[in-house]
Every structure is written in C-alpha cells, then in structure tokens.
C-alpha cells in the first residue's frame, strides 16, 4: 500500500504532494515501483497534529481522488470523518482506512452501505493531539487484540463486507509497545483477518536506528515490515515502495 499524503504537514512528506498534478505523478510512480493500492490521506495524524475541519480535508482530498480514479487501481481513503468518507465513497473510493477504528458508527454504516472493506486501526483514543498521554498498557497486545476483535464483530454484524486489522503503530504507543506488538504480531494475525502494518519512517524506526531524518529511515522501515510479513502481515503501508518491492521479491523467493 503506497502512502499518498495530500497534506501540508505530514511528518515525513508534508507539502510535497498537495497539488493534484504532483499527487498524480507520485501515485503513478508508486504504481510503477510495485504498489498494489494507494492510500490517500488529507489530514496528518502524527502525534500532536491539529485537527483539520472536514471542509478543508475534502478540499484537499476530493480533487486528488477524482484524478486518481482513472488509474484503475484500488484507492483507499485515510480519514476518521464520516462526512469525508461519504464524499470519497460517493466518488468511487474502494476502501476505508479509519484510524479512528470505527468508533463512529456512521463510518461503519457507510462501509456497509457502499460494501467496501475497512481497515480498523487501533488507537487508545481517537485524538492525535492527546493520544500519547494514553500510552499506558498492562499488556499492549492483549488490549489491542481485544479492541480489534470487538470492533470487527460489530462491523461484520452491521454488514461491512471485510475488515483488515491494524495495530496502529505509534498511535498512543511508545517504542516498547511498538516492539512488543511487532514481536507478537502473530496474536493479531490469529484473529483471522488480513493484517496491515504501518511503521514506515516512524519515530520508532528513528529510535532504533538513530536516523533522525524520517525520509532516510528506509532500511529500518523495510526491516520492520519484513519482520511483520514473517509473522503473517498481508499488507504494509509504505512511503518507499521500490525499496519494499525489492525486499519482498527476495523474501518471497526464499520463502516460496
Ligand atoms: N499511520 C499514519 C496514517 N495513517 N493508517 C493506518 N491504517 N495505519 C497506520 O499506521 C497509519 C495510518 C501516519 O503516518 P503518515 O501518513 O506517514 O503521516 P501523517 O499522519 O503525518 O500524515
């Protein structure tokens, strides 16, 4: 899954693809490098990020989505707002990526109505501004699993056709929480739904490697995502598609 942030302030690529032409070029590039789907987001959810009003998020997102649809590849929309999700689905988006983890029942109803799969991501609270204050767990894997199981049951009961589960790396989680989730990812995989992992360029990678510039955290990101794939993850959400495609080509040849 290639990341396309059409934001002025995303932590590693803010401001680079926030014009329609630049976004379209970036999407084409990621597809050429081997991405199977593109995740378009118009609100940064990095820790401490200020919320973006729905109108502004739509103003950024919808023209880009319209430009990408003719590419004929699956498009996922990274939003927590039902108003934004509704417009994106009406335009033709294929998948909802909800970092709010379907806490808002309107998101669930939309996915059911449009019959699209949803990425259910864990965060201790649906608020990037305060989530790091909630990075307190007895057993982070057990708590994340319980949340994902509960949200999945509600989603499927409401008619959502398919869910993808995401532990939400970095969302109200510190280095030791993220490492524990990665080490024990098989417990999330055991819930029986495809698992998506997003550690691309994140702070945890910087903490482990000492690489301060997020755009230079490529090798660490690939290593983390390979660890996830080996534990059963089916999707990785990445900025650096070519590097991941090369690593996965080798991984799959060895494991075939
Ligand atoms: N991480 C980010 C945004 N959306 N969605 C899912 N499902 N999983 C993630 O781990 C995830 C996500 C944050 O990363 P990024 O989009 O690179 O940055 P920003 O939030 O600053 O735009």
Image (spheres, rainbow, N blue to C red):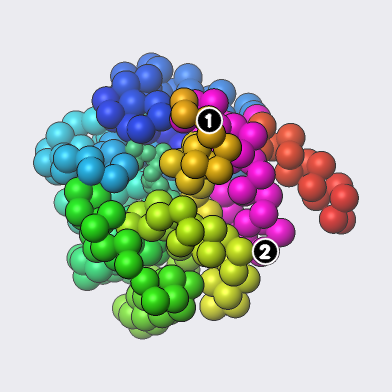
Mark 1: secondary structure: loop
Question: Could you say which quadrant of the image residue 133 lies in?
Answer: bottom left
203 left or right of 8 in image: right
**Residue 26: percent from the left, percent from the top?**
48, 23
Q: Up-down: is 239 above or below 164? A: above
Say which quadrant the C terminus sits in: bottom right
Question: Could you say which quadrant of the image residue 148 lies in?
Answer: bottom left
The answer to whether residue 35 is seen in the rendering is no
Rendered-image quarter of ligand 1: top left
Mark 2: secondary structure: loop
* Picture mark count: 2
Crowding at label 1, few (<14), some or many (≥20) Cα neighbours within 10 Å? Answer: some
- Residue 218 in the magenta stretch? The answer is yes
51 left or right of 183 in image: left
Crowding at label 2, few (<14), some or many (≥20) Cα neighbours within 10 Å? Answer: some
Q: Residue at x 38, y 57 (%)?
A: 173
- Residue 4 in the magenta stretch? The answer is no
**Residue 67: percent from the left, percent from the top?**
38, 28
Front-most of residues 44 and 179? 179
**Residue 107: percent from the left, percent from the top?**
26, 63
Label number found at residue 231: 2
Q: Residue at x 58, y 53 (%)?
A: 235
Q: Residue at x 28, y 29 (%)?
A: 9
Front-most of residues 110 and 165? 165
Magenta-colored span: 214-242
Say which quadrant the N terminus sits in: top right
Q: Residue at x 36, y 71 (%)?
A: 137
Label number found at residue 211: 1
> Alpha carbon of mark 1 to alpha carbon of mark 2: how far?
25 Å
191 left or right of 75 in image: right
């Amino acid at each position: 899954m290639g990341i396309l942030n059409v934001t002025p302030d995303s932590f590693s690529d803010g401001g680079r693809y926030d014009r329609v032409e630049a976004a379209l070029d970036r999407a084409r590039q990621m597809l050429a490098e081997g991405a199977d789907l593109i995740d378009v987001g118009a609100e940064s959810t990095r820790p401490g990020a200020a919320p973006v009003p729905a109108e502004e998020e739509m103003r950024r997102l919808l023209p880009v989505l319209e430009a990408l649809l003719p590419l004929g590849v699956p498009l996922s929309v990274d939003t927590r707002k039902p108003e934004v999700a509704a417009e994106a689905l009406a335009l033709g988006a294929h998948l909802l990526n909800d970092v709010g983890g379907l806490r808002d029942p309107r998101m669930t109803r939309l996915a059911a109505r449009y019959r699209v799969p949803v990425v259910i991501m864990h965060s201790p609270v649906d608020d990037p501004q305060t989530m790091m204050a909630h990075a307190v767990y007895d057993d982070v894997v057990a708590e994340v699993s319980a949340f994902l199981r509960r949200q999945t049951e509600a989603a499927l009961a409401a008619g959502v056709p398919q869910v993808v589960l995401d532990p939400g790396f970095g969302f109200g989680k510190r280095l030791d929480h993220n490492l524990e989730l990665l080490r024990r990812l098989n417990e999330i995989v055991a819930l029986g739904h495809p698992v998506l992992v997003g550690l691309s360029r994140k702070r945890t990678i910087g903490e482990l490697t000492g690489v301060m510039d997020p755009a230079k955290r490529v090798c660490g990101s690939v290593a983390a995502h390979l660890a996830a794939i080996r534990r059963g993850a089916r999707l990785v959400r990445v900025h650096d598609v070519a590097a991941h495609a090369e690593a996965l080509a080798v991984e799959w040849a060895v494991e075939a």
